């Protein structure tokens, strides 16, 4: 009997014993294509020799030094690298151990910024419904995924939610994509005015939505409008690129494709590619100066921040991506994946939408393509797809997002950046068979 809580609940999990390239091998000798990088984490696949070498060297040098006493060369170099490639205006890096920690730190930075600058009233956070920003209490409060929040609601700080930018579900007939983007963004302005323009601290959103809705890109112009509104009312813009960032959508940062820069940006998953737990907040020079000229420090901290092993993993992963020109492969293989999905699922009566950017794509399953009605949640279509895919040696990331209060199903595909054409074709083939089998078994 297992003593691990997550195993006790998912008691039928296979035992992973070895990773190699895009494959994970289990204790029975079965190989799985890791077509979701776990949860969009393993951007270089598994056991990349250059990352392993960097980790071994770091371990031999020093595994841990507390940031209250020392800095390390490896953490400094990672900070330099992240700022060299950062969206305009982001000038400092705060290293943490994962995505939720990054979101917590970003929310506290936003609040401290306004305390330092004398705007003590600014405390409201606005986010979007159907969003996920992590599972710690602050990040969970920001998120708008009701299923995750409900039982913890009494513990959550008050946050306010506007509609997601989700064209498949919310764009009106006869409305252009640009008009829809403008309408969706205007909800932010309305919410700021409703709450009081001097009382809103930050708006947080994912540029391309990951886990809750499945690779949903924003409408054109949506984030430019959001940026404008934040500037007009002095609200800080936090972009959560924990899942969609670090190359996943074909540019290092997803916000580059929107032509905007945030005030704070959270990254994690693809930063260290799963080789070590690591996340970071990138913050603007303006926020840093407020801290520097104010209390002189950011009132936060974790034991493992700036961990040398984590920094070594982050630095090695990012160096390989740059050296091997892998962002170009994300773009090329992303197009191949989009084509493959369109061919395999375009005519499928239960695939309502195929979307995404780069190697961050999804299909959305519906019971009725005309009405876009989702499957009844009790059918657990996404869980069936996951099981059928695992049976066929394929890891994808199926989820039930909330669609207007009902659960809908989608499958996220986020393969490693090293994937070849043949790998992408194998992923689409296996996924096609898994979806057919799963939907057949629910009907
Ligand atoms: N933010 C986003 C957009 C995420 O997708 C996730 C995790 O899936 C998180 C935050 C939380 O990251 P972590 O699980 O590393 O705490």
Image (spheres, rainbow, N blue to C red):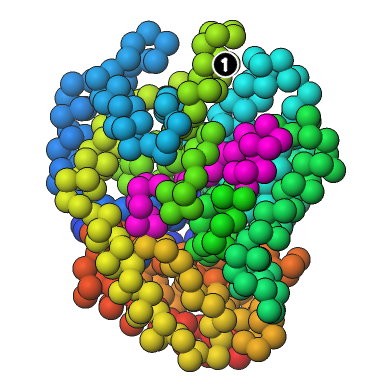
Residue 393 is drawn in which quadrant?
Answer: bottom left
Tell me, yes or no, if residue 207 can be seen here.
Answer: yes
Residue marked by disc 1: 290
**Mark 1: secondary structure:** helix
- Residue at 68%, 69% in the rendered image: 170
Range of residues picked out in magenta: 226-254
Residue 198 drawn at (x, y percent): 78, 29
- Residue at 74%, 53% in the rendered image: 187
Tell me, yes or no, if residue 132 can be seen here.
Answer: no
Q: Residues within 10 Å of mark 1 (few under 14, many from 20)?
A: some
- Whether residue 227 appears in magenta in the rendering, the answer is yes
Q: How many marks on residues?
A: 1
- Whether residue 13 appears in magenta in the rendering, the answer is no
Residue 8 drawn at (x, y percent): 53, 54
Residue 49 drawn at (x, y percent): 14, 46
68 over 343 or under it: above or below = above
Nearest to the observer: residue 81 or residue 17: 81
Residue 97 drawn at (x, y percent): 44, 33
61 over 387 or under it: above or below = above
Left or right: 73, with 262 as reference point? left
- Residue at 79%, 34% in the rendered image: 197
- Residue at 68%, 79% in the rendered image: 174
Nearest to the observer: residue 240 or residue 366: 240
349 over 9 or under it: above or below = below
């Amino acid at each position: 009997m297992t003593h691990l809580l997550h195993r006790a609940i998912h008691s039928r999990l296979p035992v992973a014993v070895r990773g190699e390239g895009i494959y994970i091998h289990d204790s029975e000798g079965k190989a799985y294509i890791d077509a979701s990088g776990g949860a969009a984490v393993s951007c270089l696949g598994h056991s990349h020799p250059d990352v392993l070498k960097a980790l071994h060297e770091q371990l031999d040098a020093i595994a841990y030094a507390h940031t209250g006493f020392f800095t390390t060369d490896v953490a400094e170099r990672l900070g330099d690298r992240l700022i060299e490639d950062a969206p305009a205006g982001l000038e400092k890096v705060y290293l943490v151990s994962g995505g939720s920690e990054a979101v917590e730190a970003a929310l506290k930075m936003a609040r401290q910024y306004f305390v330092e600058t004398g705007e003590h009233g600014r405390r409201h956070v606005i986010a979007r419904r159907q969003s996920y920003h992590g599972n710690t209490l602050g990040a969970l409060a920001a998120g708008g995924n009701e299923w995750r929040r409900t039982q913890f609601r009494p513990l959550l700080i008050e946050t306010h939610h506007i509609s997601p930018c989700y064209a498949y579900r919310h764009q009106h007939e006869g409305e252009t994509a640009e008009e829809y983007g403008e309408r969706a963004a205007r909800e932010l302005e309305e919410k700021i005015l409703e709450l009081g323009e001097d009382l809103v601290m930050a708006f947080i959103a994912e540029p391309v939505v990951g886990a809750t809705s499945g690779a949903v890109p924003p409408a054109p112009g949506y984030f430019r409008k959001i940026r404008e509104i934040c500037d007009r009312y002095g609200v800080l813009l936090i972009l959560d690129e924990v899942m969609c960032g670090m190359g996943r959508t074909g540019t290092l940062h997803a916000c580059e494709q929107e032509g905007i820069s945030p005030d704070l940006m959270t990254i994690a998953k693809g930063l260290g590619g799963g080789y070590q737990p690591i996340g970071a907040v990138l913050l603007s020079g303006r926020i840093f100066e407020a801290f520097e000229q104010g209390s002189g420090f950011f009132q936060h901290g974790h034991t493992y921040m700036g961990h040398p092993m984590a920094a070594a993993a982050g630095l090695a992963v990012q160096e390989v991506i740059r050296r091997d020109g892998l962002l170009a492969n994300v773009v090329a293989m992303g197009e191949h994946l989009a084509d493959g999905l369109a061919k395999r699922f375009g005519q499928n009566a239960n695939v309502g939408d195929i979307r995404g950017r780069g190697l961050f794509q999804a299909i959305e399953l519906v019971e009725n393509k005309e009405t876009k009605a989702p499957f009844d949640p009790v059918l657990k279509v996404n869980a069936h797809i996951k099981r059928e895919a695992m049976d066929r040696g394929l890891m994808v990331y199926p989820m039930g997002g909330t669609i207007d209060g009902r659960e809908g199903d989608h499958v996220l595909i986020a393969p490693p950046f090293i994937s070849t054409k043949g790998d992408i074709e194998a992923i689409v083939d296996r996924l096609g068979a898994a979806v057919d089998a799963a939907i057949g078994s629910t009907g």
